Amino acid sequence: MRTKCRLDAVLGMVSGKWKVLLLWELHERPCRFGELRRRLTGISEKVLSAQLRELEADGLCRRVEYPGAVLHVEYSLTDSGTALLEALVPITEWSLAHLGN
């Protein structure tokens, strides 16, 4: 039973259309909000903001503010976010082998 609860918790962290894609976009380097919005075609500002807040609350990404004339905010993966993304690689490989293109 305990394993099932933990699996549900992890799946909850990455559920939804955009969270895994956000983790993927952040794996190479930190990104600003506008850059993420451009790279994820079809995501609204409201949804992007909510998904980033949830990833941050779950400890998978961090938000860093750089003060200045214009507020500069960058998002990046935490060590936990990187580890989770690495754990998702076998699922990606499975999907390529079993779901086709």
Image (cartoon, rainbow, N blue to C red):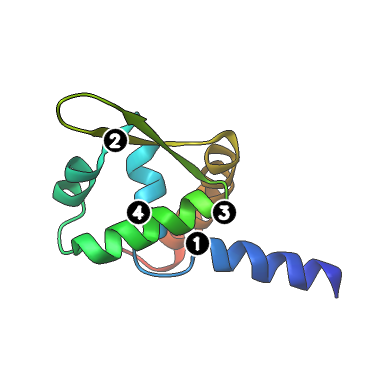
Per the rendering, the mark at residue 73 is 2
Question: Looking at this view, is 35 or 3 the one in front?
Answer: 35
Mark 3 or 1, closer to the camera: 3
Residue 5: quarter of image: bottom right
Residue visible at 53% across and 36% down?
Answer: 78
Q: Secondary structure at mark 1?
A: helix
| Labels 2, 4: front one | 2
Q: Amino acid at mark 2?
A: Val
Q: Nearer the viewer, mark 3 or mark 2?
A: 2
**Toward the viewer: 92 or 9?**
9
Q: Work out whether 70 lies above or below 36.
A: above
Question: Foreground mark, 3 or 4?
Answer: 3
The answer to which of marks 3 and 2 sits earlier in the sequence is 3
Residue under pointer 3: 58
The disc, 1 or 2, on the residue closer to the chain's N-terminal end is 1
59 lies left or right of 15: right
